[in-house]
């Protein structure tokens, strides 16, 4: 089956072919006909399976086949399709796909997120924008300032819906939904299935088609996974050793904290290994610069917090290293999903110290497999070292149990003074407690 066989226009098929694709992936085969027919979908797929094209291609086809509606009374052309993503990086990449696949169509698109000036976004919104890709917080900034028209949205896409819910965007999503017309097509995509996703889908979708191309919460078969046990104080030396000995030249390394990411970059530099960090304390310009250098192969190591676990589409990325294991087991699946994409082979290595044994057990339980474990020669584990609480994360179990500290819920915007800017997450825009009431919006956003 080809993309043309799926019912896509010759202009779209031409653009897809120029990107080097001639055969649709399983999720594209299932999702594209449903979207073309106008139905709602709830789609779950492992990362790297071509999910973005499964909604951008039929979305472009549908919009190009129908004329746009006129501007509203305020003169703002209406948005015809809205794509919400949890992070800035994912928003930028979705917009890149929309632009590239729609290059031969008479459709306009734009992306907007926090961390950059809002002025140019206001100016562009005064022109015709058929497809808007945005993070939730910056979208609501524009809603508050009256610079965006959502009254004529024909199609809503929630990309990485599970991640948006994990990041506390539920109230923002609800507010956006209240601004959209009731008659519209809804496309919900997720990587890991949860009760929160199920609840959101129940209130959003109309008789949806459920699409699932792989078992939930599993890792791709194309990824080789391995665990290296190492003492916590020797992780950095082991990482440098593995990079040098194996001559790795494109390595994505995950750190638990922003401070830890910056410290690791400095230490790798002392080992003469070129590295840059990407996290929420970095400016948008610095994040974009680091990611561009890493993608084009001029940066050897990119150290990231979980901001980068979703949406980074790096062609044939060979190596992902968990310098710190994630506190949430599902994040392990998202992290290592940056490699082994679209059928390519990849390697995922986790450096695990005694503090993280309980986190490793949680991951293995989630993915339903035991990961192979090794100790590198010269890095033997000292059995005298005892587990310690993990800073900024869950504590190691004590007394033989499996107790962990509860992660405190982020403070909601509703708990702030109305004149204060809302707190923003590193990745998207705002974070709020999952059970907080609809937050009041105020002026400046990041």
Image (cartoon, rainbow, N blue to C red):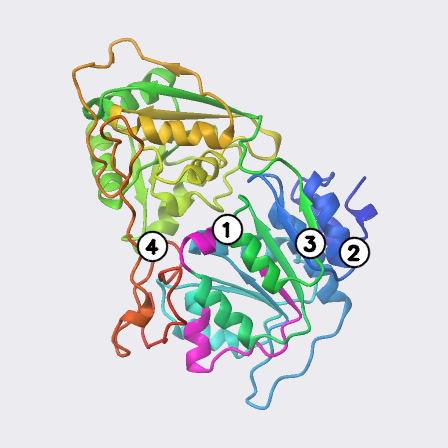
Label placed on residue 426: 4
Position of the N terminus, as image quadrant, is top right
Q: Which label was assigned to residue 297?
A: none
Q: Foreground mark, 2 or 1?
A: 1
Q: Secondary structure at mark 3?
A: helix
- Neighbour class for label 3 at 10 Å: few (<14), some, many (≥20)? many
Mark 4 or mark 1, whichever is nearer to me: 1
User: x and y percent of residue 86 in the render?
Assistant: 46, 56
Q: Which mark is residue 162?
A: 1
Q: Nearer the viewer, residue 238 or 217?
A: 217
User: Viewer-nearest of labels 3 and 4?
Assistant: 4
Pointer 4: residues within 10 angstroms few (<14), some, or many (20+)? Answer: many
Residue 161 visible: no
**C-alpha span from label 4 to label 1:** 17 Å
User: Which mark is first along the chain, 4 or 3?
Assistant: 3
> Judging from the image, what secondary structure is the residue with disc 4 in?
loop
Q: CA distance from mark 3 to mark 1?
A: 22 Å
Secondary structure of the residue carrying numbered label 1: helix
Distance Cα–Cα, label 3 vs label 4: 29 Å
Above/below status of 14 relative to 38: above
Instruction: Check disc 2: other Cα within 10 Å, few if <14, some if 14-19, many if 20+.
Output: some
- What span is in magenta? 139-168
Kindly tell me whether residue 334 is visible in this rendering.
Answer: yes
Q: Is residue 251 above or below residue 54?
A: above
Q: Which residue is mark 3?
A: 57
């Amino acid at each position: 089956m080809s993309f043309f066989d799926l019912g896509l226009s010759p202009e779209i098929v031409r653009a897809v072919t120029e990107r080097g694709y001639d055969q649709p992936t399983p999720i594209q085969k299932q999702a594209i006909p449903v979207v073309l027919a106008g139905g709602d979908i709830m789609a779950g797929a492992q990362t790297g399976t071509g999910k973005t094209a499964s909604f951008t291609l039929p979305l472009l086809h549908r919009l190009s086949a129908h004329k746009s509606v006129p501007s509203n009374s305020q003169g703002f052309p209406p948005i015809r399709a809205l794509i919400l993503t949890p992070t800035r990086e994912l928003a930028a990449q979705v917009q890149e796909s929309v632009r590239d696949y729609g290059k031969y169509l008479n459709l306009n698109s734009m992306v907007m997120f926090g961390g950059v000036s809002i002025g140019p976004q206001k100016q562009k919104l005064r022109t015709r924008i058929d497809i808007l890709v945005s993070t939730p917080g910056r979208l609501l900034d524009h809603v508050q300032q009256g610079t965006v028209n959502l009254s004529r949205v024909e199609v809503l896409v929630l990309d990485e819906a599970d991640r948006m819910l994990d990041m506390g965007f539920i109230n923002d999503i609800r507010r956006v939904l209240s601004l959209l017309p009731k008659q519209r097509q809804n496309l919900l995509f997720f990587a890991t299935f949860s009760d929160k996703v199920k609840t959101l889908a129940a209130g959003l979708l109309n008789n949806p088609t459920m699409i699932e191309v792989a078992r939930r919460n599993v890792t791709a078969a194309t990824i080789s996974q391995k665990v290296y046990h190492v003492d916590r104080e020797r992780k950095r030396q082991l990482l440098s050793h593995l990079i040098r000995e194996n001559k790795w030249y494109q390595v994505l390394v995950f750190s638990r904290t922003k401070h830890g990411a910056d410290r690791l970059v400095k230490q790798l530099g002392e080992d003469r290994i070129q590295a840059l960090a990407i996290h929420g304390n970095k400016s948008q310009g610095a994040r974009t610069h680091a990611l561009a250098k890493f993608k084009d192969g001029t940066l050897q190591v990119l150290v990231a917090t979980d901001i980068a676990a979703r949406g980074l589409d790096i062609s044939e990325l060979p190596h992902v290293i968990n310098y710190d294991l994630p506190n949430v087991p599902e994040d392990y699946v998202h992290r290592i999903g940056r490699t082994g994409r679209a059928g390519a082979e990849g390697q995922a290595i986790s450096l695990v110290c005694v503090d993280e044994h309980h986190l490793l057990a949680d991951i293995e339980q989630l993915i339903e497999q035991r990961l192979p474990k090794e100790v590198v020669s010269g890095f033997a584990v000292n059995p005298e070292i005892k587990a310690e609480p993990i800073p900024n994360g869950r504590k190691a179990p004590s007394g033989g149990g499996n107790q962990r500290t509860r992660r405190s819920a982020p403070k909601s915007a509703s708990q702030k003074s109305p004149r204060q800017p809302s707190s923003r997450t590193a990745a998207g825009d705002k974070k709020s407690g999952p059970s907080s009431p609809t937050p009041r919006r105020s002026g400046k956003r990041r």
